[in-house]
């Protein structure tokens, strides 16, 4: 009992036939033994999670309808109703305002109820709002349609984020959100190109609205196939005080706090680009109206490629902020080249870089929220990002409306690109410090960009 351990060292049993060695001295039969592999096997692709696959399929179908509707509505307002620039801005605000107001409430609801059913209801409301545009006889009715779509989007965003976080293991959340981003941008390409061809062939926006509504309804059954998963933690009663809980959680968590700063910068720059790009094309690059559509398509293509690359990341814990900050550097460089050179052929390539850079932000930001916020608060923290997005859009629209006549478009966009790139570099520097202090997850071993992530694991509170 207390004596020497008499266990024999590993080796062949007496009388066992000796295993043959190859010319390098390796056991011949062991060459095919899985035990010689180094490191853990990669997890299977996230699309092997069947419920998540249904989310991707339904999301792609429904968002194809959304982009077909959204682009057609603004074209209809400009050409069918001869809307002025102020009326177009008001129409966009009609979408943003209900989204900003309703998102925090529905973000709280999804943390206490069913993400599946809230997602399904959101897309059902979207499908119901599209025919309102087909029946419209004035800009007021177009505004009513897009306002309802804004409410639907306020339900869809936090519900999808929470459901993904409940379905997908945390080390595959970056990959999962990359797939969702790729789905969104493929729907953008198909929806806008398809609606443009249909509108050109028929000359009737009502036909496009009708087809978009049918496609939106066709996406609903896929969401019914998803299991009704709900967060298993505390579910306190809803209160107005709880509206700020997502902000408090984001501020107290070091990684989420850095995400908020980067997101605020990114959304401001994105809205500046969205507002000023058509004027840059018209007055500086010298392209026609179709040039705006082609460059938006190039942006969408770059975003889809970036999202597909993210979707190949099998172990993404610790990569989220690296992808966000690196994406901002890439997008900032693209903006500097795009606006600085102002050559159409160069702009096509540069705007692909911008799209790819921002797609890294969209994919990784939601993955970080889903990992760091916990299942009890994923909806609320996602709502914070949503409000930040549309809120800065409203604010930038108001500011530009007041000072737009004094803005020199080309220098402002070049300067915005510089600020975005510097913000990304600053984010990388801040992340290095958090990781060195053990307050942020390091990048997984062997990751191509893991050099910055050599710090200790984040300390748990």
Image (cartoon, rainbow, N blue to C red):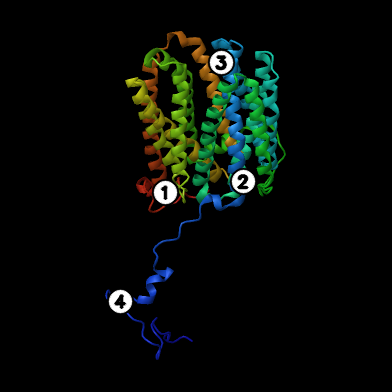
Which element is circle 3 on?
helix
Q: Is residue 102 visible?
A: no
Q: CA distance from mark 2 to mark 4?
A: 49 Å
Q: CA distance from mark 2 to mark 1?
A: 29 Å
* Nearer mark to the viewer, of 3 and 4: 4
* Vertical position of residue 183 compared to residue 14: above or below: above
SS at mark 2? helix
Instruction: Give the number of the disc on residue 54.
Output: 2
Residue under numbered circle 4:
22
Q: Which residue occupies the extreme top position in the image?
A: 405
CA distance separating discs 3 and 2: 36 Å
Label 4, residues with CA under 10 Å away: few <14, some 14-19, many ≥20: few
Q: Which residue is mark 3?
A: 89
**Residue displayed at 56% across by 9% down:** 84
Q: In front: mark 2 or mark 1? A: 2
- Is residue 292 shown to the viewer in this render? yes
**Residue at the location (40% across, 90% down)?**
14
Badges 2 and 4: C-beta atoms under 8 Å apart? no
Q: Which of labels 3 and 2 is toward the front?
A: 2
Residue 182 in the image, given as x and y percentages of width and height = 50, 39
Q: Earlier in the sequence, mark 2 or mark 1?
A: 2
Q: Are marks 3 and 4 in contact (CB under 8 Å)?
A: no
Displayed quadrant of residue 281? top left
Horizontally, residue 116 falls left or right of residue 75, namely right
Q: How far across and how far down the image is residue 454, in percent?
A: 37, 50
The spot of residue 209 in percent (x, y) is 64, 25
**Residue picked out by circle 1:** 443
Residue lying at 44% horizontally and 25% vertically, measured from the top left: 295
- Gap between marks 1 and 4, in whole Å? 39 Å
Mark 2 Cα shell of 10 Å, populated few (<14), some (14-19), many (≥20):
some
């Amino acid at each position: 009992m207390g004596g020497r351990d008499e266990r024999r060292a590993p080796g062949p049993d007496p009388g066992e036939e000796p295993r043959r060695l190859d010319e390098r001295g390796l056991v011949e039969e062991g060459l095919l033994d899985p035990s010689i592999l180094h490191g853990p096997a990669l997890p299977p692709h996230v699309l092997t999670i069947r419920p998540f696959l249904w989310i991707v399929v339904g999301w792609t179908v429904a968002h194809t309808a959304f982009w077909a509707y959204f682009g057609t509505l603004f074209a209809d307002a400009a050409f069918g109703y001869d809307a002025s620039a102020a009326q177009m801005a008001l129409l966009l605000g009609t979408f943003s305002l209900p989204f900003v107001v309703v998102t925090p409430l529905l973000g709280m609801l999804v943390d206490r109820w069913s993400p599946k059913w809230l997602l399904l209801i959101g897309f059902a409301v979207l499908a119901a709002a599209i025919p309102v545009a087909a029946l419209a006889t004035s800009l007021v009715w177009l505004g009513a349609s897009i306002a309802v779509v804004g409410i639907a989007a306020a339900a869809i965003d936090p519900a999808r984020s929470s459901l993904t976080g409940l379905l997908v293991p945390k080390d595959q959340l970056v990959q999962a959100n990359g797939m969702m981003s790729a789905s969104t941008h493929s729907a953008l390409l198909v929806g806008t190109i398809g609606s443009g061809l249909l509108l050109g062939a028929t000359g009737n926006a009502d036909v496009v609205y009708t087809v978009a509504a049918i496609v939106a309804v066709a996406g609903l059954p896929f969401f019914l196939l998803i299991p009704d998963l709900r967060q298993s933690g505390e579910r306190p009663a809803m209160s107005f005080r709880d509206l700020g809980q997502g902000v408090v959680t984001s501020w107290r968590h070091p990684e989420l706090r850095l995400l908020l700063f980067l997101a605020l910068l990114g959304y401001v720059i994105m809205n500046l680009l969205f507002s000023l790009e058509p004027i840059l094309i018209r007055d500086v690059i010298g392209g026609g109206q179709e040039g705006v559509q082609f460059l938006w398509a190039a942006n969408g293509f770059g975003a889809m490629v970036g999202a597909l690359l993210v979707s190949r990341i099998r172990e993404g814990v610790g990569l989220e902020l690296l992808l966000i900050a690196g994406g901002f550097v890439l997008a900032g460089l693209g903006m500097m080249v795009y606006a600085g050179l102002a050559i159409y052929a160069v702009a096509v390539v540069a705007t692909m870089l911008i799209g790819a850079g921002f797609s890294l932000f969209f994919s990784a930001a939601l993955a970080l929220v889903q990992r760091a916020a916990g299942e009890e608060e994923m909806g609320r923290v996602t709502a914070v990002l949503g409000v930040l997005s549309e809120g800065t859009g409203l604010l930038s629209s108001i500011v530009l409306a007041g000072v737009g006549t004094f803005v020199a478009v080309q220098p402002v966009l070049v300067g915005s690109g510089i600020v975005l790139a510097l913000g990304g570099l600053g984010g990388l520097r801040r992340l290095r410090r958090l990781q060195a202090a053990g307050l942020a997850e390091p990048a997984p071993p062997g990751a191509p960009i893991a050099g910055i992530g050599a710090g200790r694991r984040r300390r748990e509170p």
